[in-house]
Image (cartoon, grey):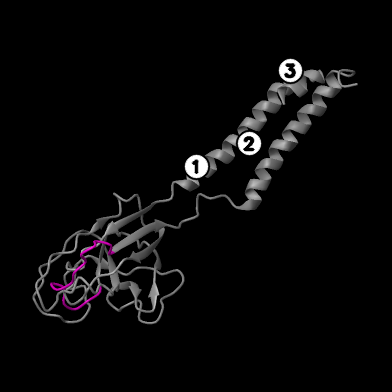
């Protein structure tokens, strides 16, 4: 392109400004693309024998995920999706069950299990707070005690908005008895993916940005043509 400019004797000032304008425009486009590409996405294994609710049998405690460590803040919209399955009856040759649920919490405190199953409650999670599902809850997806299903037999995946003051999220297998849950191949996992599009420019904005660059270049072209008549003849 610079060779074309030189061959047509376009003023150096116009050439420099044109290149600078192009670099600025495309630099901004690249910056916006890089920023939008930084959306968080990662997969974590879930121990199906661990729990954050009280159950018929004692089980390991679910380990809460720190939202701060994941780069997730209050108000962010994330997608939670289950991968893999486990056996709910201790048979590693028959891993077919994949129900998974979760609850947000203001802290990572998890009280001891009382060894009894009183339904899917957050009695052990004193900081539990309700999630916000922008698209609404599917039938039986949202329970009345801040627990929501990530997957059940009839669906997989939940898009949620992180509630205000949420600092952690507890995720576990959805069950009433956990000590006989087996995941021999370790494929039972959750994928946490940021779907917030606040940093991704709208198409109209991108068009306007490019149009600005083109107009700036054109105006500079006309200005230099008036100052240096005959150079383009």
Marks counted in the figure total: 3
Residue at which label 1 appears: 34
Residue 47 or 113: which is nearer the viewer? Answer: 47
Q: Which mark is residue 82?
A: none
Q: Residue furthest front?
A: 93
Secondary structure that dominates the magenta span? loop
Which of 60/74 is in front? 60
State whether residue 180 is above or below residue 139.
above
Compared across the picture, whether 83 is left or right of 186 comes to right
Q: Nearer the viewer, residue 125 or 91?
A: 91
Residue 98: which quarter of the image?
Answer: bottom left
Of label 2 and label 3, which has the lower sequence position? 3
What distance separates the C-alpha of mark 2 from that of mark 3?
20 Å
Expressed as whole percent of the image width and height from the top left, the position of residue 179 reads 13, 72
Percent position of residue 64, x then y:
22, 59
In the rendered structure, does residue 120 fall within the stretch colored magenta?
A: no
For label 3, the residue is 12
User: Magenta stretch?
Assistant: 174-188
Q: Quadrant of the N terminus?
A: top right
Q: Residue at x 76, y 28 (%)?
A: 220
Q: Position of residue 112 (x, y in %)?
A: 10, 68
> What crowding class fits label 2: few (fewer than 14 Cα within 10 Å), some (14-19), or many (20 or more)?
some
Residue to which mark 2 is pinned: 25
């Amino acid at each position: 392109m610079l060779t074309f400019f030189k061959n047509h004797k376009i003023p150096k000032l116009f050439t420099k400004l044109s290149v600078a304008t192009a670099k600025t425009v495309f630099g901004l486009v690249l910056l916006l693309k890089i920023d939008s590409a930084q959306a968080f996405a990662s997969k974590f294994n879930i121990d199906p024998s661990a729990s954050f609710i009280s159950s018929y049998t004692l089980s390991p405690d679910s380990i809460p995920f720190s939202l701060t460590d994941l780069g997730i803040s209050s108000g962010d919209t994330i997608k939670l999706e289950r991968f893999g399955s486990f056996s709910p009856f201790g048979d590693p040759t028959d891993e077919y069950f994949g129900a998974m649920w979760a609850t947000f919490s203001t802290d990572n405190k998890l009280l001891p299990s009382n060894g009894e199953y009183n339904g899917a409650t957050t009695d052990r999670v004193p900081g539990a707070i309700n999630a916000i599902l922008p698209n609404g809850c599917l039938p039986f997806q949202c329970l009345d005690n801040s627990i929501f299903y990530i997957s059940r037999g009839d669906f997989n995946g939940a898009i949620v908005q992180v509630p205000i003051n949420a600092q952690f999220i507890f995720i576990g297998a959805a069950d009433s008895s956990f000590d006989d849950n087996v995941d021999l191949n370790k494929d039972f996992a959750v994928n946490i993916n940021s779907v917030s599009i606040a940093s991704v420019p709208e198409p109209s904005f991108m068009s306007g940005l490019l149009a600005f660059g083109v107009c700036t270049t054109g105006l500079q072209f006309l200005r230099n043509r008036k100052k240096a008549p005959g150079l383009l003849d």
